[in-house]
Image (tube, rainbow, N blue to C red):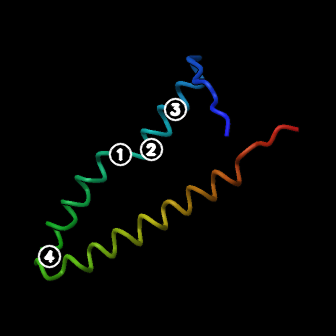
Amino acid sequence: MSRQPFIFDAPYVTLAVTIIGTTIAPWMQFYQQSSIADKALKAKDYVYEQLDVVVGSVFAVMVAAFITIACCRHPV
């Protein structure tokens, strides 16, 4: 396995920032908390809410993976 050096050109840095920024989005944490508060869930309902979060996260990662695969460009 070879390691590619990190290049400090604007396009590469922009790509790195956008990948990290779209993967780790703090607003999702606040949205999830407000969603639980708006639903007025009790502690016994957290199991279903956790299942909802896990299923949604897996689905989002699958969609992102398929988009990445569909949009990748192979060198000729």
- Residue 51 in the image: state x and y as whole percent: 33, 76
- Residue 57 in the image: state x and y as whole percent: 42, 64
In the rendered structure, the answer to whether residue 17 lies left or right of residue 76 reads left
Q: CA distance from mark 4 to mark 1?
A: 24 Å
| Residues at marks 2 and 3 touching, judged by CB atoms closer than 8 Å | no
Looking at the rendered structure, the secondary structure element under dot 1 is loop
Q: Earlier in the sequence, mark 4 or mark 2?
A: 2
Looking at the rendered structure, the secondary structure element under dot 2 is helix
Say which residue appears at 59% left-offset and 17% top-offset.
9
Say which residue appears at 11% left-offset and 77% top-offset.
43
Q: Earlier in the sequence, mark 2 or mark 3?
A: 3
| Residues at marks 4 and 2 touching, judged by CB atoms closer than 8 Å | no
**Which residue in the structure is indicated by mark 1?**
25
Looking at the rendered structure, the secondary structure element under dot 4 is loop
**Which residue in the structure is indicated by mark 4?**
41
What amino acid type should be assigned to the residue bearing mark 1? Ala
What amino acid type should be assigned to the residue bearing mark 2? Thr
